[in-house]
Image: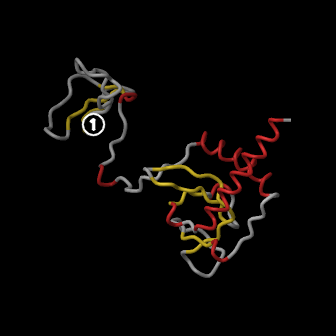
Amino acid sequence: MDTKTTPVGYSRKLCNKWQGPYYITEVTGKNTYKLRRCSDDVPIKGPVNANRLKQYHDPQDRPTNNVDVPTDDEMSDDEDEEENTQDTDEIVQNDIQPENEVQRNNDDNRTNDDPDMYQVERIIHAKRINKKMHYKIKWLGYSHRHNTYEPEENIPQELRHDYKVRKDQTKRIKARKTKR
């Protein structure tokens, strides 16, 4: 249940915004419910509107993978960045070689014999997630919707080096265009 009150001396920004879990004991109206606290079985005074409630998920059932999933806004930014990198790909040819195979965490259709190995087309983006570098990978034979962030230790040094060279060339090309 969403808490509307903030204890005296505390900022709403830093306080827990949700309390619970609660049991729904009665439906009193179209969008109102009577609740009972799970921990000590004490009923809550008065009905609570549905807009102040959300489903409770037990922390033990939550996924342990802390990798950020890009939002739609980040996806559109990455797609713009991907279009910009395609211009520089004409300058630096990134040939697909056997060492471009990387273990991937998903179970999708595979393009080679080894069920746990995928071929990398190129690295699109790099960012730090939980104090570790992760690289956004464009998988060979898959659309941009299947791009994933992979930790640095899963990516061969040659691919990371090619990405950095391509990124530096992109910066130089943009600098030349702005000078003109």
Left or right relative to 88: residue 23: left
Which amino acid, mark 1? Answer: Ile
Residue under the point 26% across and 39% down: 21
Residue carrying label 1: 24
The percent coordinates of residue 120 (x first, y second) are 65, 67
Query: Could you say which is closer to the camera, residue 95 or residue 137?
Result: 95
Determine the residue positioned at 57% across, 74% down.
117
Q: Nearer the viewer, residue 61 or 130?
A: 130
- Residue 69: give x, y in percent of width and height: 51, 49
The picture quadrant where one finds residue 15 is top left
> Quarter-wise, where is residue 2 in the image?
top left
Answer left or right for 84 relative to 109. Answer: right
Residue extending farthest right: 180
Q: Which quadrant is home to the C terminus?
A: top right
**SS category of the residue bearing label 1:** strand
Occupied quadrant, residue 143? bottom right
Instruction: Answer left or right for 127 relative to 119.
Output: left
Other residues around mark 1 within 10 Å, as few (<14) / some (14–19) / many (≥20): some
